Image (spheres, rainbow, N blue to C red):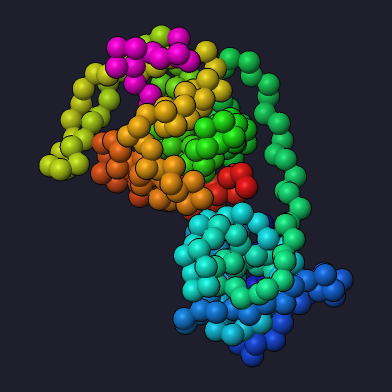
C-alpha cells in the first residue's frame, strides 16, 4: 500500500476531524455514505486496516463526524458504544472500529477483496512456503472450511498453524503435513494415517521451566486433513468446550484453548494474538 499520498492529505484531514466536519474525499462516494458520530474517551485512531495493529492514519476526537462507506469484519473490540468485530471503512479509505461509532442507520458490507492468486495445485504435498503471504493464501481456504464444519474461528486456526508450523517450514509440516503439532498419544485418530517421533520442547507453566523430550506426532495424507483434524479435536474434546462461548471473540477463543492445555508455552496466547493482529487474520473469519 502506498503511504506517501496519504501523508500529503493527513494535515487537512486531521483539521477536519478536529473541527467535527464530515470527512469526504470522493463526492460520488459521499452521496451513498453514512454519516455517524464518534464516541470515545480521548481520541480514536483511524487505521489502515481492520485491526489495531495496522498503521495509524489519523485520530478523531469525541463527537467528531465521520462519513462511512461500508463495513468489514475485523479485530474484536470492546468500545464505548458496543462490543463488535465490525470495522467501518470511511470514504477516505481509513478504518475505525464500529465499537466507537454511533449511528442508527444500516451500513452496507464492503465488496469482498479480490481472491488471492491461486497457489499451484497440490494434491498431497505441503502448503507453499515461498513467502508468508503465499502460505496464508494457501491456508485460508482450509481454515475457513474448518470454521464452517467445526465453528473454530479461521483467524485462530491460521494463527495456530503459523505458530506451530513456522509458516509451514517445520519438519513436521513439510514431511508429515501436520500444521498444528497434533500428537498421537498412542493413536493417530480417525483422520491421520500414522505417527512419527520428533524431539520437542515442553514447558511447565507453573515452574516456568522447559525441557527437551521425544513425542509422537500425527502424520496426514494432505494439509486439508491436518486442518480438519485440528478443528475436530477442538470441537469434540470437552476440555475445549469453553472456547466455543467466544466464537465471535477470536482473542478470547485462543486464550481458552491455551487454558485448556493445547500448549505448554506460557506465552502461547500472547503469541497467537500478536499473529492475529499483526497480519489481520480476523479478515478471514466467516460472518
In this rendering, the answer to whether 180 lies above or below 225 is below
Task: Name the foreground residue: 13 vs 131.
Answer: 13
**Residue range (magenta):** 181-193
Q: Residue at x 47, y 52 (%)?
A: 249
Whether residue 52 appears in this view of the structure is no
Q: Is residue 71 above or below residue 226?
A: below
94 in magenta: no
- Is the residue 18 above or below the residue 81 in the image? below
- Residue 236: x and y, percent? 42, 28
Q: Is residue 214 above or below residue 281?
A: above
At x 72%, y 40%, the residue is: 115
Q: Quadrant of residue 29?
A: bottom right
Residue under the image location 60 percent in, 73 percent down: 101
Tell which of 5 and 149 is nearer to you: 149
**Horizontal placement of 147 versus 5: left or right?**
left
**Looking at this rendering, what residue extends furthest in the left direction?**
207
Amino acid at each position: 500500500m502506498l503511504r506517501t499520498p496519504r501523508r500529503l492529505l493527513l494535515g487537512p484531514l486531521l483539521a477536519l476531524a478536529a473541527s467535527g466536519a464530515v470527512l469526504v474525499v470522493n463526492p460520488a462516494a459521499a452521496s451513498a455514505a453514512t454519516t455517524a458520530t464518534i464516541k470515545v474517551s480521548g481520541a480514536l485512531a483511524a487505521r489502515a486496516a481492520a485491526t489495531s495493529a495496522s498503521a495509524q492514519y489519523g485520530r478523531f476526537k469525541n463527537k467528531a463526524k465521520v462519513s462511512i462507506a461500508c463495513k468489514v469484519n475485523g479485530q474484536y473490540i470492546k468500545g464505548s458504544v458496543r462490543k463488535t468485530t465490525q470495522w467501518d471503512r470511511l470514504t477516505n479509505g481509513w478504518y475505525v472500529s464500529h465499537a466507537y461509532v454511533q449511528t442508527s442507520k444500516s451500513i452496507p458490507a464492503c465488496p469482498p477483496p479480490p481472491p488471492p492468486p491461486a497457489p499451484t495445485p497440490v494434491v498431497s504435498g505441503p502448503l507453499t512456503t515461498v513467502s508468508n503471504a503465499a502460505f496464508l493464501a494457501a491456508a485460508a481456504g482450509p481454515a475457513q472450511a474448518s470454521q464452517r464444519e467445526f465453528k473454530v474461528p479461521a483467524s485462530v486456526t491460521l494463527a495456530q498453524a503459523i505458530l506451530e508450523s513456522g509458516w509451514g517450514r517445520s519438519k513436521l509440516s513439510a514431511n508429515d503435513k501436520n500444521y498444528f503439532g497434533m500428537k498421537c498419544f498412542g493413536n493417530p485418530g480417525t483422520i491421520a494415517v500414522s505417527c512419527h517421533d520428533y524431539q520437542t520442547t515442553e514447558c511447565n507453566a507453573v515452574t516456568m521451566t522447559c525441557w527437551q523430550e521425544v513425542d509422537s506426532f500425527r502424520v496426514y495424507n494432505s494439509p486439508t486433513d491436518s486442518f480438519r483434524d485440528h478443528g475436530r479435536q477442538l470441537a469434540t474434546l470437552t476440555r475445549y468446550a469453553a472456547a466455543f462461548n467466544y466464537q465471535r471473540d477470536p482473542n478470547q477463543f485462543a486464550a481458552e484453548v491455551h487454558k485448556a492445555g493445547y500448549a505448554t508455552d506460557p506465552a502461547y496466547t500472547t503469541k497467537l494474538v500478536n499473529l492475529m493482529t499483526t497480519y489481520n487474520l480476523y479478515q478471514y473469519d466467516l460472518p
